[in-house]
Image: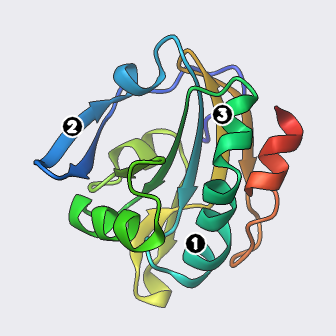
Amino acid sequence: MTIAIGDKLPAATFKEKTADGPVEITTDQLFAGKRVVLFGVPGAFTPTCSLNHLPGYLENRDTILAKGIDDIAVLAVNDWHVMGAWAQSSGGLGKIHFLADWDAGFTTAVGLEADLSAGGLGLRSKRYSMLVENGVVKALNVEESPGQATVSGAAAMLELL
């Protein structure tokens, strides 16, 4: 069952690559007492994710934060090395969190998994964005069409804030 507006996020631990190696970040550390924009993508370095979805959040980072958002994070079912390389190559390192949901634990717990085996990618995340306040989902925008980043993009999130 997909998580819904008003639901509390399940406890999970992500990994994020830093200069000192991978660090663990729990949902409590990321969301407790904060307003956070989280967006999920099918995979780092994939075309729509790299050319459309991520750039919108990086370009609008300051505007989003100015609207009372404490943090922005992107999540993918990739390992922390891949997410770290994506952060570096995209220019997003140090600007937003690049979270590795390496085992799809969080993604499946919130019901936003996508079986992309036919395309050779296996179990991944659906493309989505959510506004989370103190661990509770206040807005959830899930893309219905593959290759689109419209309802989950930064422009759509800015309209909600």
From the image, state whether disc 2 or disc 3 is nearer to you: 3
| Label 3 CA crowd tier, 10 Å (few <14, some 14–19, many 20+) | some
Instruction: Say which mark, if any, is on residue 24.
Output: 2
**Viewer can see residue 68:** yes
x and y, in percent, of residue 92 in the image: 46, 59
x and y, in percent, of residue 137 in the image: 65, 26
Marks 1 and 3 sit apart, C-alpha to C-alpha, by: 21 Å
Give the quadrant of residue 158. Answer: top right
Residue under label 1: 49
State which quarter of the image contains the C terminus.
Answer: top right
Residue under label 3: 65
Give the side of residue 48 with respect to residue 79, left or right: right
Q: What's the colour scheme?
A: rainbow
Labels 1 and 3: the sequence-earlier one = 1
Instruction: Say what amino acid the circle numbered 3 marks.
Output: Leu
Name of the residue lying farthest toward the right = 159
Instruction: Say what amino acid the circle numbered 2 marks.
Output: Glu
